[in-house]
Amino acid sequence: MMSAPVPTPANPGALAPGTTLMEYRILSVLAADGFGITYLARDAILNRDVAIKEYFPADLARRAADGRVEPAAAESEPNFRKGLTQFLIEARTLARFVHPDIVRVDRVFEASGTAYMLREYEKGESLAQKLARGPRLDEAALKAIFAPLLDGLEAVHRAGVLHRDIKPGNIFIRDEGPPVLIDFGSARLASRDALHDIIPILTPGYAPAEHYIRSGGQGPWSDIYSAAAVLFHAVTGEAPPDALSRLRIDNVAKALGAARGHYSASFIDAIQWGLASHEQDRPQGVAQWRVALLGGVPSRAAPRPAPPPALDDTRKYVWVSLGVLIFYLFVAGADIVQQRAQHYRAYRHSVMPAERAATAAGARQSAPAAASGGLTREQFEQNLPNLAGRFSEIDTDRNGFVTTEELQNHLRRPK
């Protein structure tokens, strides 16, 4: 259930502070764009602050008097419903990722005619706020921000997901911990059935040309364009030009040229590469662009699992492992047998003559085997449990002892 909101002048469609949304109480608006509104809220059950994003496409929806969200007009309803479906898909997609540089969705629910995704609230500021406050960030600071962000972006690309809305406002600089990408924009693309639906939702300057076309060839290179546009803003102090206007007049190279006195040539060249107007001229993956942009800054992304070995390699590893095991058993077994032999010789030379005479008869039967270092069945099973079941097979002379020679012969025997 939700209490009726009181619209605020700054965000006329937003829920007002004090509004209750299930067990959450709205405290303030954190951010708003053409697709949704993000609130700071208080979890009344867990007594903690959370961030809640509400699906509220400004050009397709309106807020009713009771707080419900509904299509702004009958003709808006199809796109509104498609966007709502994709909003839920986006939330469930993000919930799959556990990565320090990707926003983690903890809960998603539908209420009041719309949907909400919830994440932990963290203190910090957006890169947009940081750039607006100044001074201009140097190369080392920008690399420190983008090195972990590229790790997170590469992780979602490997899972077949695109961010689609990278911009300074969607890069959050935590007070504690690495920066994080927020507000994935996958739902924006699903609700576009005509050009007039695109323009208010896209962020001009940060969206590549293929985002304006339903049949555009989108891929990791599209997110790379947006990330490069963020860096363009950071190094030039100017918002990047719109991708469509660049198809007629392109001043990106000129603007970046003016920044070359403050940043290394390789850094500027990598930004310009990422901003290529045609997707085939850009880096095709994050790993490729990372090397050009960051140089020696290492990735802290978890290594990708190695592919399973081929059948021939598997056989090779089995034989190597078996050889190591046989070698160990050979050395360990021989050492045990040798120790037994030494113990027997020490005993034989230390017993009193009278004792040797008293046991002469028994000694004549057991001494040959014992003197050679033989192990009884009990000793063998205790010291070599892996071969315990093969005592009779290894004891080739059937005298009840396994000698060093018998053990060596067995281990050398082809299997």
Image (tube, grey):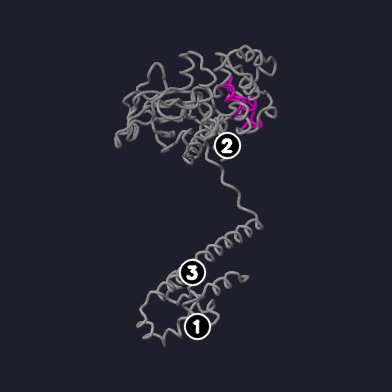
* Residue contact between numbered discs 1 and 3, judged by CB atoms under 8 Å: no
Mark 2 or mark 3, which is nearer the start of the sequence? Answer: 2
Numbered disc in front, either 1 or 2: 1
Q: Which residue is mark 3?
A: 338
* Crowd rating for badge 2 (residues with CA inside 10 Å; few <14, some 14–19, many 20+): some
Q: Amino acid at mark 3?
A: Gln
The answer to whether residue 398 is left or right of residue 114 is right
Numbered disc in front, either 3 or 2: 3
Q: Amino acid at mark 2?
A: His
Question: The C terminus is located in which quarter?
Answer: bottom right
The answer to whether residue 98 is left or right of residue 314 is left
Numbered disc in front, either 1 or 3: 3
Residue drawn at 64 percent across, 27 percent down: 210
Read off the magenta span. 203-229
Residue 66 placed where, x, y %?
36, 28
Reply yes or no: does residue 137 show up in magenta. Answer: no
Between 4 and 37, which is closer to the camera in this rendering? 37
Residue 109 placed where, x, y %?
41, 38
Between 172 and 390, which is closer to the camera in this rendering? 390
Q: Compared with residue 174, is residue 365 higher up or lower down, i.e. above or below?
A: below
Q: Secondary structure at mark 3?
A: helix
* Crowd rating for badge 3 (residues with CA inside 10 Å; few <14, some 14–19, many 20+): some
Q: Secondary structure at mark 2?
A: helix
Q: Which residue is mark 1?
A: 399
Between 251 and 142, which is closer to the camera in this rendering? 142
Q: Which residue is mark 2?
A: 157
Mark 2 or mark 1, which is nearer the start of the sequence? Answer: 2
Reply yes or no: does residue 227 show up in magenta. Answer: yes
Question: The N terminus is located in which quarter?
Answer: top left
Among all residues in the image, which is located at the extreme front? 353
Q: Amino acid at mark 1?
A: Asn
Could you tell me how far apart the alpha carbons at marks 1 and 3 are, in whole angstroms? 18 Å
